Image: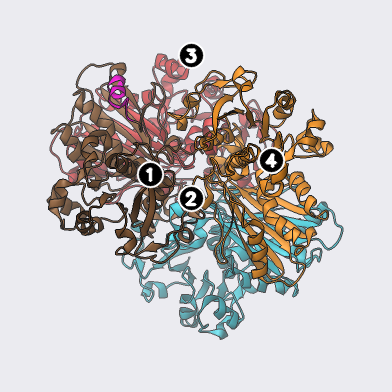
Chain colours: A brown, B red, C cyan, D orange
Amino acid sequence: MLKVGIVGATGYTGVELVRLLKTHQHVKLHAMSSRSETGTLVSDYFRNLEGHCDLKFTALDSLDLQECDIIFFATPHGVAMDRAPALLALGKKIIDLSADFRIQDVQLFKKWYGIEHSCPDLLKTAVYGLPEHNRARIKNASLIANPGCYPTIIGLGLTPFLKANVIDPKSLIADCKSGVSGAGRKAELGMIYCEVADSFKAYGVKGHRHHPEVTQELQKINADSKLTFMPHLVPMNRGMFATLYAKLNQDISLEKLQQILVNTYQNEPFIKILPPNSQPETRFVRGSNQIQYSINIHSDQLVILGAQDNLVKGAAGQAIQNMNIMCDFPENAGLELIGIIP
Amino acid sequence: MLKVGIVGATGYTGVELVRLLKTHQHVKLHAMSSRSETGTLVSDYFRNLEGHCDLKFTALDSLDLQECDIIFFATPHGVAMDRAPALLALGKKIIDLSADFRIQDVQLFKKWYGIEHSCPDLLKTAVYGLPEHNRARIKNASLIANPGCYPTIIGLGLTPFLKANVIDPKSLIADCKSGVSGAGRKAELGMIYCEVADSFKAYGVKGHRHHPEVTQELQKINADSKLTFMPHLVPMNRGMFATLYAKLNQDISLEKLQQILVNTYQNEPFIKILPPNSQPETRFVRGSNQIQYSINIHSDQLVILGAQDNLVKGAAGQAIQNMNIMCDFPENAGLELIGIIP
Amino acid sequence: MLKVGIVGATGYTGVELVRLLKTHQHVKLHAMSSRSETGTLVSDYFRNLEGHCDLKFTALDSLDLQECDIIFFATPHGVAMDRAPALLALGKKIIDLSADFRIQDVQLFKKWYGIEHSCPDLLKTAVYGLPEHNRARIKNASLIANPGCYPTIIGLGLTPFLKANVIDPKSLIADCKSGVSGAGRKAELGMIYCEVADSFKAYGVKGHRHHPEVTQELQKINADSKLTFMPHLVPMNRGMFATLYAKLNQDISLEKLQQILVNTYQNEPFIKILPPNSQPETRFVRGSNQIQYSINIHSDQLVILGAQDNLVKGAAGQAIQNMNIMCDFPENAGLELIGIIP
Amino acid sequence: MLKVGIVGATGYTGVELVRLLKTHQHVKLHAMSSRSETGTLVSDYFRNLEGHCDLKFTALDSLDLQECDIIFFATPHGVAMDRAPALLALGKKIIDLSADFRIQDVQLFKKWYGIEHSCPDLLKTAVYGLPEHNRARIKNASLIANPGCYPTIIGLGLTPFLKANVIDPKSLIADCKSGVSGAGRKAELGMIYCEVADSFKAYGVKGHRHHPEVTQELQKINADSKLTFMPHLVPMNRGMFATLYAKLNQDISLEKLQQILVNTYQNEPFIKILPPNSQPETRFVRGSNQIQYSINIHSDQLVILGAQDNLVKGAAGQAIQNMNIMCDFPENAGLELIGIIP
């Protein structure tokens, strides 16, 4: 049993890692760090862990953490790049759920995240952890940049059609809708219940940090890719929905488009292509690592609908999927949970 | 005081009409009809009306209804067109909140609503009740087709730019999000709390009845207009949000686009253009007749954001606005309520 | 038109005062103060006020505020008692929505609110603003202690039966449920959407500040009154529900108990006693100043159910009702709005 | 691997059984019956099962069902008692999640459920499946009456103190709050989103079917037990909260009361007693089989707070726990899932 540590374990992504890892046969949770809660029993802090976890939150420099084989960073940006060099030198595997190693262009990183990248050399060895695109490279990586939730659902939805060259790469629009947990777990006025419940809004309208990330990945597929990205906030705890628009560049049937999608993902354990006339809903993937997609044509527009759980395939689940690949575990270890309805 | 009647008063639109009309100085609610609840005290059925309304639900053929000067139909499609001819012959004014008189093409109507139109002649005299477009014609009308909620927010958002000829009319996309009351008040499995709460989905993906309606109106502005329309369901009671995409057909600044919008609506009492850097949220128009819009540019895409209350400007409020214009009342009579937050 | 000022106008109670006062014929909103937002246009801060309010937030010492005839304090405790003496000396009328003047025993006040009372003399002249109990005294008051939301719904529910001497005053239990706006508008982790939505909990379990207040008022009716009070948090924006249990001290029919309640409140404009077999729901009083009660007997237990809007009858609405009484306005001025459903 | 069948598998309890059984090592789901959906692929109906279940819904008389070793009835009342005799004769084990075998008094059953009991003889052999009370009898049972959600949380909360004889058995009050899934999955007007969301109400005020059931069980502990029971509806999908009041009949410390509770349940895998100053919240048991309790004293009132997931410990989870005991599986098989937050 390999030992796992979680840095920044008081957020929603951290506690979700614990929930999923509990069902994992090949690793054992060994340490959870938190600056603010050092010394607190984890199950006193997250009482859903009552009876499931007897760890205490430790400091980031604790011995416990150093004893781990694999370390997940579920921290704000800036922490992972600060700690990664030393940990990698000790032979640890790192999966960073923050943005520190996602954007290869350090200028772009600085522009969007407001800080200088502290280890551009490491950045070059980091692998973008989208298993459906980079499985082979992930296998040999020591440092994984776990993708953002939006880039995951947008990238996996558009890529098959970009590759098949059936859509205009300059026409891409991603109208995305996220549950509130996507904004993290922090005390901000705009996030309190009464500012969010029974309402709907767009946010990040002038530019969202996931935009350069998803553009970088789409342009790897087709250098001409240009995306209009508009994220919205849904009054729900979890779940992310993407409505993706792309202009078809040819006369092509829905059947053929469906075939492209099905062929691309037929061996992927976590991508489900719905049959024609079925459409995704976020509740059907709540708590599971699946993305469900459907496609539709409206005259010359291809409309791709996708749903995922922003905390699972959009964060913790994908991180575990990456770990499984890196460590040669079955790819679905710890990820077989059925979505919970209602 | 003119006498007002409401046909089909057990739905959300019906009770919303009552709420608004209560603050109206120039009309008096005289009759409310309901097939299923005939004889029931209205305030026993909707207990928010306790102390505000001493009417009983009457049958559709009741004398009470015939004594009214103005009649609102808040019924499923098919009822208003059945009753309108006789009532108009008696000199009544009719405002139909259903779809019966919205679509001028009777073949198209039949295709989407599944029934033959029973009075195509009347259809020609019906006025589409979007005051910001048709105020003069509404003034002289006896029969108003009150617009659908989606056509209202989409039409008012896109029209100024279509008219100014700054967007490609073939590039229009309306990604819309509606609160659940938009689906009406009926016992359907898909509408029960646990199927809707904490989830998000698209619906009407293969085609929504508001699509031909809004297309008809947009094509009056520019005959080349072509719209991709995708409605979604938000787990909230009220509120409708529109994210409208249109390709700019020229190099034009945000300031100039903002000016187009501001100029168009500066004298409109219920359209508010937000200053740059402010964006609409449905909570700010909850219970009010306002639509709030903002605009943004993402490279060559114009992105218009709009929020309205689907039951007010999207239904009952707009109906009262139409009545005010028809009857020469102040246009904001009964419509001055401030949105309720939270 | 008298001039009204609101101190602490960035909270939910403050903006609710604005919403209601807009429909008031006899007063004009003249000033709104906020420490943190001085200089900001109020309608830029609360965009539901767009087109309804052209004031800017002013400082607490501004001339604007001094020009007001009536001043509402919608502030945290400690502010009103600090400012009241000077304002009263200038002849202003004050309605304090905070707790500063609710508890007559200064030791008890200090115990629960953690601060010394700064003007115990004023405390003696303050009138507890529960119109149904103290209308005559309110009429002549200059300083009103506007009741807490829980004490309002509990006090009005239990008092008729305590007065009629049909329940054991030592047996009282108030199991209360509040929407989240009851906790105010502040950035706290426990109040963010994902900590509250789709969950239910008790809070203030070891003791809630409204307990001494409601006990003080109940003991004015019967000195032996003893109340077990348990508040809970409901994932909804507005609304407060009370389930009140009291042991009947005699064999008495439901009809007679209903009569006691009906007789007590028959002339009260904002208390509605539901007919047998009807039960209150918070949605029917959303946005209105009504409380709706029903009663039931379970063997020797009287069970009173009540629903109010915590921000209206539980705060801003009751404050306006108090102003109306003080100023000889019609008691329902500004308070005739129908509850908004859904 | 024993074969499991689920009758009535289109409800929330049915699909929850599937979710939990998926993680069970000792049984295999073999058949799911549904009258209305016979022939439909289960994963087309509940798309959270996509990739997890390749069964089709079968008819109640299908061979598939007859091949099962254990059969869960997740049906409306009346179905299980109709089918149980024949199935038991075939040697099947039956766990009935409906009310058919819960109430031993057939007159009382008829009064509350409106139908004659069709097999009173079987009723005598049925075991009330509350493992913490009846583990030994469950072990040898063939027919389990799986308890209602309210009786579970009320019964387990009050029993230790009734047994310890520290509370007055005539003073019991259960003020309970349930998520909407407790009402089942059916198309009723009162259950649609807009009638429930952002509101709170009591229901079953004149009498709820779980009242005779929980009274029957409490009176087994102390024949004098008398309970006032008031259920309420919370706008949330899952979760049940109980606030239990009982009068202490002696002067006893919180520590001793806590000890009574801790001693009672120290070996129970699914009952967690929170430390003093911690209080339960339903979100911490969402999706898990735990009940969490805390206790508090308010003068001479004992106040017990409890939280469970109505669909798990309140239904499907407890049913599996019963199966595990009957079949000599580890009691926590299939029930080790961590609660999902947020």
Q: Judging from the image, what secondary structure is the residue with disc 4 in? A: helix
Q: Judging from the image, what secondary structure is the residue with disc 3 in? A: loop
The image position of residue B162, as x and y in percent, is 24, 32
Neighbor class of circle 3 (other Cα within 10 Å; few <14, some 14-19, many 20+) is few
The image position of residue C305, as x and y in percent, is 68, 54
Q: Which residue is mark 4?
A: D139
Q: Is D256 placed above or below A215 here?
A: below
Neighbor class of circle 1 (other Cα within 10 Å; few <14, some 14-19, many 20+) is some
Q: Is C311 placed above or below D204 here?
A: below
Pair 4/2: label in front: 4
Q: Identity of the amino acid at label 4?
A: Lys
Q: Identity of the amino acid at label 2?
A: Ala
Residue D59 location, quadrant: top right
| Span shown in magenta | A258-268
Spatial separation of the CA atoms under disc 3 and disc 1: 65 Å
Q: Which residue is mark 2?
A: C197
Q: Quadrant of the N terminus of chain D?
A: top right
Asked if disc 4 and disc 2 are in contact, CB closer than 8 Å, the reply is no
Regarding residue A197, the answer to whether it shows in the image is yes
Asked if both marks, 1 and 2, belong to the same chain, the answer given is no
Q: Which residue is mark 3?
A: B116
Asked if both marks, 3 and 4, belong to the same chain, the answer given is no
Which chain letter matches label 4?
D
Q: Judging from the image, what secondary structure is the residue with disc 2 in? A: loop
Which chain letter matches label 1?
A
Neighbor class of circle 4 (other Cα within 10 Å; few <14, some 14-19, many 20+) is some
Residue C266 location, quadrant: bottom right
Tell me, yes or no, whether the highlighted magenta stretch contains residue A88: no
Q: Which residue is mark 1?
A: A26
In the foreground, D81 or B56:
D81
